[in-house]
Amino acid sequence: MATIASKIQEVSRRIARACDAAGRPVASVTLLAVSKTFGADTVREALAAGQTRFGENYVQEALDKMAALADARARLEWHLIGPLQSNKTRVVAESFDWVHSVDRLKIAQRLSEQRPASLPPLQVCLQVNISGEASKSGLAPTEVEAVARAVSALPRLRLRGLMAIPEPAGDLVAQRRPHRELRELLERLNKTGGPTLDTLSMGMTADLEAAVLEGATLVRVGTAIFGGRPPAEAARSGG
Ligand SMILES: *Cc1c(COP(=O)(O)O)cnc(C)c1O
């Protein structure tokens, strides 16, 4: 059985090949290991292999893992990538380094108010519903500019960019389209004169090559590193 270390290496090779194909430096893409449903021991194994950035979907599960890994906190960067309800913003503001799933101004305002002064600003991305699916969370592309302007003004947040979870698509051409749309949206925002946004959080196990070809700066990879998740996970609601 492949170890987590060897699977991280294989994912890093996939990223490097895609960067080569795109004519981009390998260092321009960050790997976020999505550890949802896997325990603290598994995260520790990945950390021992040199992986320091972890993405979590469920707030309580993440808090439990953070507690179990408190001794390694200084080396870890925790990213919330799952849906965030307003009754959970305080613990998130107190515990995470990044939130990728900001999809309402109200959530951003609460995170800013609740971010402790002792911590650096919370790094955030706006989640965009790029495929236009009725069931998915995320801002409509047309809403993004106004929300980005308002979020940029919040004192305890630092708006870094955009995140999306495109609909699964079979081939590379179809996979690239939503990723390209998210990149173009970021480019348009960067022309409106606000603070420069440097992060495109897009690409997962199935489509990371398409995402890197379209400019992803951070790919969120779970399955290719940790293996399949239990089917029950699909039925869980976020938060
Ligand atoms: C679970 C999840 C991932 C990782 O997906 P894989 O297909 O396992 O790589 C990435 N992003 C988000 C938002 C997720 O919920």
Image (tube, rainbow, N blue to C red):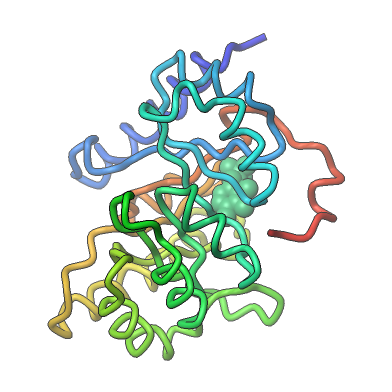
| Residue 127 as seen in the image, left or right of residue 24 | right
Q: Is residue 126 above or below residue 148?
A: above
Query: Residue 3: which quarter of the image?
Result: top right
Q: Is residue 176 above or below residue 213?
A: below
| Residue 35 as seen in the image, left or right of residue 150 | right
Q: Residue at x 42, y 36 (%)?
A: 53
Measured as percent of width and height from the top left, residue 152 is found at 27, 76
Measured as percent of width and height from the top left, residue 124 is found at 38, 62
| Residue 233 as seen in the image, left or right of residue 163 | right
| Residue 63 as seen in the image, left or right of residue 157 | right
Query: In terms of depth relative to the viewer, which is nearer, 193 or 95?
Result: 95
Image quarter where the N terminus lies is top right
Image quarter where the C terminus lies is bottom right
- The number of callouts visible is 0
Measured as percent of width and height from the top left, residue 214 is found at 33, 58
Q: Residue at x 13, y 82 (%)?
A: 193
Q: Residue at x 25, y 47 (%)?
A: 22
Query: Residue 133: which quarter of the image?
Result: bottom right
